[in-house]
Amino acid sequence: MSVNATPAGAQAAAEAEAPDGRHAAVPEQRSRRGSRAPLSENKRAERRLGLLLCAPAALVMVLVTAYPILYSVWLSLQRFDLRFPDERKFVGLENYVTVLTNDFWWTAFGVTALITVVTVAVELVLGMGLALIMHRTLVGRGIVRTAALIPYGIVTVVAAFSWRYAWTPGTGYLANLFDGSAPLTERASSLAIIMLAEIWKTTPFMALLLMAGLALVPEDLLKAASTDGATAWQRFTKVMLPVMKPAILVALLFRTLDAFRVFDNIFVLTNGGNETSSVSMLAYNNLIRGLNLGIGSTMSVLIFITVAIIAFVFVKLFGTAAPGSDDGERR
Amino acid sequence: MADIVLDKVSKRFPDGTTAVQDVDLEIADGEFVILVGPSGCGKSTTLNMIAGLEDISSGELRIGGERVNDKAPRDRDIAMVFQSYALYPNMSVRENMAFPLRLAKLDKETINQKVDEAAKVLELTALLDRKPANLSGGQRQRVAMGRAIVRQPKAFLMDEPLSNLDAKLRVQMRTVVSRLQKQLGTTTVYVTHDQTEAMTLGDRVVIMRGGAVQQVGPPQELYDHPRNLFVAGFIGSPSMNFVHAVVEDGRLRTALGDVPVGDRIRRELEAGDAPKELILGIRPEHFEDAALVDDETRRRGMEFEAPVDIVESMGSDKYVYFTVEGERASAAELEELAADTGAADFAGGGSNLVTRLSAESSAREGETRRAWFNLEKIHLFDPGSGRNLTLQEGRSAGALAD
């Protein structure tokens, strides 16, 4: 502060000497022109301070995320099976060839992609409905919002267990509805139940993100649209959705990244049986159960790359940005 | 093109508050009517009810002779301009203006032609491909107007359309709005809290307070013949001076001296339930520097002496602020007006008199000056009811009338 005070003070003194009449006539111009020179210096100091303030957090991030990621990449380039520790050796991209030519990997990848696409699509539709309800509710707004958020507040594993018990033949109330069938023993029905559990669990999160987007739509805009002759549906599609687009994209991005790493529900409901493994399950099985650090790490790295590609596509191609922040096209 | 009739229209909110109460108003085809009043007076609610954005609790609304109480906004064929402009941020200027036409399912050629026409009228042709974010406030405002006029609706409804513009642009846009309305001859209802806009724009002005209409009439009539204290205080800038007056022996004792009253006022004051205290209202321009008044004029008014507080020279005339001793005029209406302008918090002691004197006046700050005021132009108000006692058959005749 004390460094910057000098030029600003000199500026003020110079201004004070200017003839009064001109002063009053062009106050706006004067302040703009006058403040430019010291501002850049201010800005540089501000930027330096900003970097310094970010540094501790950035350092911690590097330690807890960058190091493990780099270590995984390093492991993925080695033959490294803890059951045969003596055979550890650098093999280059051999592990990648192994994984990418393996049917198990591609089956798991397909399952994961299917779960991601279906759950995110359904969650978007349901979440939008829920968000509209929460946004429009006048009576008992707090209760409605709390009730809608309960599934998201329950620990995923606990929720998954309750779903599993519900579908267990003989004792589960849902299984009994279908004449004691055992849907978790068949592939299609298992996948359906996994997706159902995912959707039930994370729709509230989607709704919450979308509700933040709804709050961005000015009331006047909707009023204007109705006097312009728009029906409720036209107001929704032609006015609300375009204005909400940034929020929708952010919600989709978050949910897609999350959904692609689906693990808990599958782990509890089927444990990957009947070819219902996701890529995360497969990596876990190889890495932790199979103790094959090389192959397991390769899979982890591949998941990381896929997720990075998804994020890249969203940010660069669809122009996803945080809601409310300036997006380049408009300026 | 259509007339708009409000027949005892009221708005009550679920929580029991009454925002608008029994508003009767007939707006002729092609008329430009201004709804004006302090914030919370129900003017915007009234406009929203005409637009169909708010339900009407009771009463009837007719547009073009047809009852539209239960019609959706889109079926009323009206266009609205908002204070926030309410432009669709994802659409270009052209798309914004074409939006109502596209919804009306007109063919592309007609839409383009109509948009181009409207853009020409509002000088927006060069901006048609821009997004609203890249426009200045005044340009956005014009686009909002353009979106309203392309459709040639039965009526324009404008909700403080100029309030977000800076002072200079507001004056400029005022003439644009006025010219446009005359050119198109479309019935227009315009809401504002700015009495200058109300005075300059409308064919007729509706002054509202607490959900009720106070007075309806052409601007000059409201200015010259205010029906009550609220209207008198609201219309005019600088506003009317209010002086406390006590009725004694058929005269009015005020800080400006004893004011004589004519027979008519005396009769009114001698009635049993007549108020013993009054509020005397004088507009700033009805004062003059006593040194500049000729004898003929002098007889029609009276003089007083008071210390000059501040002199503001406007070039064409001078605003001279006098400090006068004595009790301040007080009434519910005046407090409400003061609260609206934010003047309530720095009232200070004594009262200030704003006068508009000739530019030739040599009044200087600090001196005690003799000033004259016109008795034919003063108004007397009952502080209890706010009624203007000098008003006879809608005309104000001053305190001396017989």
Image: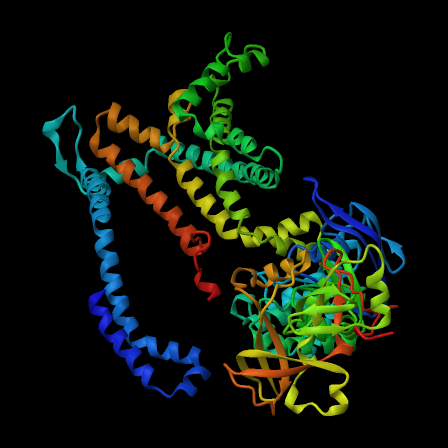
Q: Is residue A272 above or below residue A182?
A: below
**B352 or B22: nearer the eye?**
B352
Residue drawn at (42%, 80%) of the image: A29
Give left or right: position of A243 versus A57. Answer: right
Residue B218 percent coordinates (x, y):
80, 72
Furthest-front residue in view? B249
Which of the image's four quarters has the N terminus of chain A? bottom left
Q: Is residue B182 above or below residue A249?
A: below
Could you tell me if residue A270 is visible in this image? no
**A141 or A310: nearer the eye?**
A141
Give left or right: position of B358 versus B76. Answer: left
Occupied quadrant, residue B156: bottom right
Residue A315 percent coordinates (x, y):
41, 53
Give left or right: position of A134 versus A327. Answer: right
The mark tally for this picture is 0
**B24 or A202: nearer the eye?**
B24
Occupied quadrant, residue B37: bottom right
Furthest-left residue in view? A86
Residue B402 percent coordinates (x, y):
87, 74
